Image (cartoon, rainbow, N blue to C red):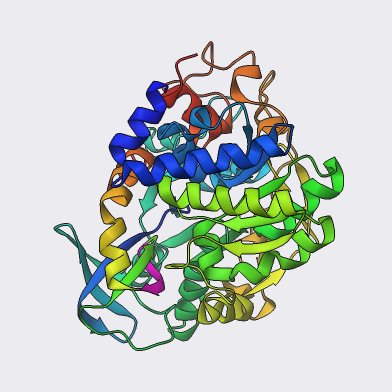
């Protein structure tokens, strides 16, 4: 038994349960007489798998392909440059989530370096902080640079509804919100079916419901199981996936029922519908423009729409030599990249997959001794 | 970024807000995404200070330790 399995067992409440899960998964995988490729969509899952050594424990029967579910990694460079250019404007207080702070432009500029130069950039823990700032400082223009998947979009929707209700006039929102089923459809359409099963995102699914993936998994006949973030959650999901794969079944199942239902959070979905409209396409870093994958503000909220005031520049997407795009598709692993752990390191990140706390490169740098 | 963790409602502070607590950490959360009425003692899953789902107490307690550890490791850069 290797060290990662021991580590895993020491962390779990019931080591025997972990052992029996591992044995059952490996046993099923062996009957398939090929390595089973499982994509974990969510960067939080990538970190859990590596942190608890699940990838090592299930090798070689199972290979994990790391997916695009890392909001900071997939924020396109043109949108990052847009953020930086707005943040540099006099008369603007620029707000966003802290995850974006360190992401560098090709010129080495980041919100962090701009803030150090005296630009007014404020990291917020929630969208409503931007609302309070705007309300309490009517003479200032507050910009909220919103990003994230369907988990975070309802909070932005609530911010906009409140701002409209209270007739706030000094708040602009730039929406970079992304939809996860759309990018799965895009990847599978473009790349073919290169995985046997998918671990579906836990908290995104709590909002949009497991049903949101039904169309894409049926179209490509691939099984998906929505998982939580603990080792046992993941093992349960992987076992369910293996059962579906071995029976040739497809569809969406849930191994995280304490948080996720088929329907999801209807109230959150309604708020999103009220505020956002689907874009024709939207850029994802490393992937290009993905059809029907982005949310823009509805016309009724145009008073708050920062996109009517600022346009994104045209830029090249990735730093030279950076493999983040292929890594986000699950087509390459961090050690395949020439920059990984050489010039691109957690303390001096070059590409977005190393900058983000959910990025696959950071997970490898932290948890793997290569 | 898509992390969420369980909090227990301590006090309803407004039509869209509540004070919530977990492992000694108390904070103000937004409850505007939850359709059903919430009361002190209820558990919710919280993401960027918004409750996104009401959850079962026993399950919330059961999973708390692991969440805590994962959170610490994942959100070390979250400022």
Q: Residue drawn 50% across and 13% down?
A: A370
Specify the principal SS of the magenta part: strand
| Image location of residue B9, percent across then percent down | 23, 74
Q: Residue drawn 47% across and 82% down?
A: A167
Query: In the rendered image of this protein, does residue A278 appear above or below residue B79?
Result: below
Which image quadrant for residue A179? bottom right
**Quarter of the figure that contains the N terminus of chain A:** top left
Q: Nearer the viewer, residue A176 or A193?
A: A193
Q: Nearer the viewer, residue A88 or B14?
A: B14
Query: In the image, is residue A218 part of the stretch drawn in magenta?
Result: no
Query: In the image, is residue B51 part of the stretch drawn in magenta?
Result: yes
| Image location of residue A9, percent across then percent down | 34, 36
* Count of marks overlaid on the render: 0
In the picture provided, is A313 more to the left or to the right than A170? Answer: right
| Image location of residue B67, percent across then percent down | 32, 51
Q: Give the residue furthest to the left.
A: B24
In the picture provided, is A364 more to the left or to the right than B74? Answer: right
Q: Nearer the viewer, residue A315 or A44?
A: A44
Which image quadrant for residue A19? top left
Q: Residue drawn 40% across and 58% down?
A: B4
Residue A142 can be seen in this image: yes
| Image location of residue A355, percent across then percent down | 49, 32
Q: Residue drawn 59% across and 38% down?
A: A27
Query: In the rendered image of this protein, does residue B9 appear above or below residue A198?
Result: below
Residue A110 can be seen in this image: no
Q: Which residues are magenta?
A: B49-55
Query: In the rendered image of this protein, does residue A91 appear above or below residue A22?
Result: below
């Amino acid at each position: 038994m290797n060290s990662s399995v021991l580590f895993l067992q020491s962390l779990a409440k019931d080591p025997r349960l972990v052992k029996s899960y591992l044995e059952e998964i490996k046993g099923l995988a062996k009957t398939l007489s090929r390595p089973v490729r499982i994509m974990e969509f969510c960067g939080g899952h990538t970190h859990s798998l590596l942190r608890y050594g699940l990838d090592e424990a299930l090798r070689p029967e199972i290979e994990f392909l790391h997916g695009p579910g890392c909001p900071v990694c997939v924020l396109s460079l043109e949108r990052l440059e847009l953020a930086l250019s707005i943040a540099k404007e006099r008369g603007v207080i620029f707000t966003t989530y802290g995850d974006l702070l360190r992401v560098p432009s090709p010129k080495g500029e980041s919100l962090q370096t701009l803030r150090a130069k005296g630009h007014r950039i404020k990291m917020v823990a929630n969208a409503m902080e931007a609302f309070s700032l705007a309300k309490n400082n009517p003479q200032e223009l507050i910009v909220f640079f919103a990003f994230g998947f369907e988990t975070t979009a309802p909070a932005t929707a609530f911010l906009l509804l409140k701002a409209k209700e209270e007739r706030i006039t000094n708040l602009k929102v730039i929406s970079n919100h992304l939809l996860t089923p759309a990018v799965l459809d895009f990847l599978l359409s473009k790349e073919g079916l290169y995985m046997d099963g998918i671990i579906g995102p836990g908290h995104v699914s709590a909002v949009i419901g497991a049903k949101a993936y039904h169309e894409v998994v049926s179209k490509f006949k691939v099984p998906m199981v929505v998982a939580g973030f603990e080792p046992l959650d993941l093992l349960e999901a992987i076992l369910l996936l293996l059962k579906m794969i071995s029976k040739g079944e497809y569809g969406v199942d849930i191994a995280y029922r304490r948080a996720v239902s088929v329907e999801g959070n209807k109230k959150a979905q309604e708020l999103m519908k009220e505020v956002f409209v689907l874009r024709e396409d939207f850029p994802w870093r490393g992937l290009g423009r993905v059809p029907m994958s982005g949310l823009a503000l509805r016309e009724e909220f145009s008073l708050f729409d920062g996109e009517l005031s600022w346009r994104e520049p045209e830029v090249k997407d990735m730093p030279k030599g950076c493999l983040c795009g292929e890594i986000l598709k699950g087509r390459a692993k961090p050690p395949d990249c020439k920059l990984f752990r050489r010039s691109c390191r957690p303390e001096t990140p070059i590409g977005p997959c190393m900058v983000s706390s959910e990025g696959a490169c950071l997970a490898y740098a932290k948890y793997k001794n290569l | 970024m898509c992390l969420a963790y369980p909090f227990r409602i301590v006090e309803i502070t407004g039509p869209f807000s509540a004070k919530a607590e977990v492992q000694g950490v108390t904070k103000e959360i937004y409850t505007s995404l939850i359709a059903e009425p919430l009361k002190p003692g209820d558990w919710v899953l919280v993401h960027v200070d918004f409750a996104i789902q009401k959850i079962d107490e026993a399950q919330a307690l059961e999973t708390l330790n692991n969440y805590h550890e994962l959170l610490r490791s994942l959100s070390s850069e979250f400022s």
